Image (spheres, rainbow, N blue to C red):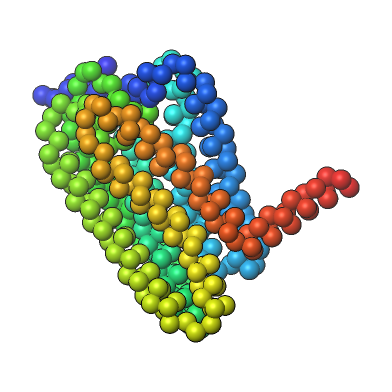
Amino acid sequence: MLLNLGNQSSVTSFTLVGFSEYPHLQIPLFLVFLTIYMVTLLGNMGIIVVRKINPKLDTPMYFFLSHLSFLDICYSSVFTPKLLEILIVEDRTISFRGCMTQFFFGCACVITEMFMLAVMAYDRFVAVCNPLLYTVTMSPKLCVLLVAGTYMGAGTCSLTITYSLVQLSFCEPNVINHFGCEYSAVLSVSCSDPSLSQMVCFIISVVTETCSLLIILASYVVIVVTIIRMPSKGGLQKALSTCTSHLTTISIFHGTVLLLYCVPSSKSSWLLVKVATVLFTVLIPMLNPLIYSLRNRDVKDTVKKLVRSKLHSQST
């Protein structure tokens, strides 16, 4: 369907291909993704609730972690419901406004999480290198400012990229070879010169990724130096335990981002792009709460107490 705007013609909706080329996998994929989505929601909401319940977890690290969980809920909810819908419904269309809205929030969540992981790296740096001044340095006011800064910065970057995308013309056939409005997939159906939008996206991507990685790298270089100089093994183990979960999350997140950047833009690589996007939008949001909760005694103890109290209330 086309909408005439002056000398330009712009589509009012797109058709998402999804995984329709594999009809026999539609139901199995639906069940797998639905299960993962439910685990994602429960796991991340669990992290937020556990932090509110346990006073021991009222620390800057868990303040940032609860926002990371909130981001994972938002990011997963931007793409997964539509993915589940197009797997079982024949009508795979998404409106132009819906597509741009999905792209904006998806992009904002990715950049915010990128900055949030950098903020968490700085938090670990202060905790390991200046433990006596940790609560003073990472004051509630500073934590709020850091989190607000990540949301505002990511929102501005996402709005800029989305605006550059909206300025393009999109003509028939308006078929997006993806399950969502991922940047390269949307760009492939444009019938106008995308050079300006590509340049904007490239600059913002490089700047945000580089800044995030530099902050993380600088923080962990100092952390490693500090750990090497620690005389006691107990202090060494404690320092390592506070960083392991965060390092695991960083490795998975940025590894998948770099994988998406490295995939060549060709028709033969679309399946790889879809799989990488599934990892990014569906699987990673589920893994983050598991990574942090399985390695943290306070979180596990709080969950056990909640389960016991729930079972006790049901039995009485």
The quarter in which the N terminus is drawn is: top left
Q: Position of residue 308 (x, y in %)?
A: 78, 53
In this rendered view, identify the residue nearer to me: 54 or 253: 253
Q: Is residue 128 left or right of residue 263?
A: right
Q: Is residue 59 above or below residue 278?
A: below
Q: Is residue 153 above or below residue 124?
A: above
Task: Report the number of numbered marks.
Answer: 0
Q: Is residue 295 left or right of residue 68?
A: right
Residue 10 sits in quarter:
top left
Q: Is residue 252 visible?
A: yes
Residue at 35% x, 22% y is: 17
Q: Position of residue 28 (x, y in %)?
A: 52, 23
Residue at 20% x, 47% y is: 202
Q: Position of residue 262 (x, y in %)?
A: 25, 43
Q: Is residue 166 visible?
A: no
Residue at 44% x, 29% y is: 82
Q: Position of residue 137 (x, y in %)?
A: 45, 78
Residue at 30% x, 48% y is: 258
Q: Is residue 292 left or right of residue 93?
A: right
Q: Is residue 312 above or below residue 197?
A: below
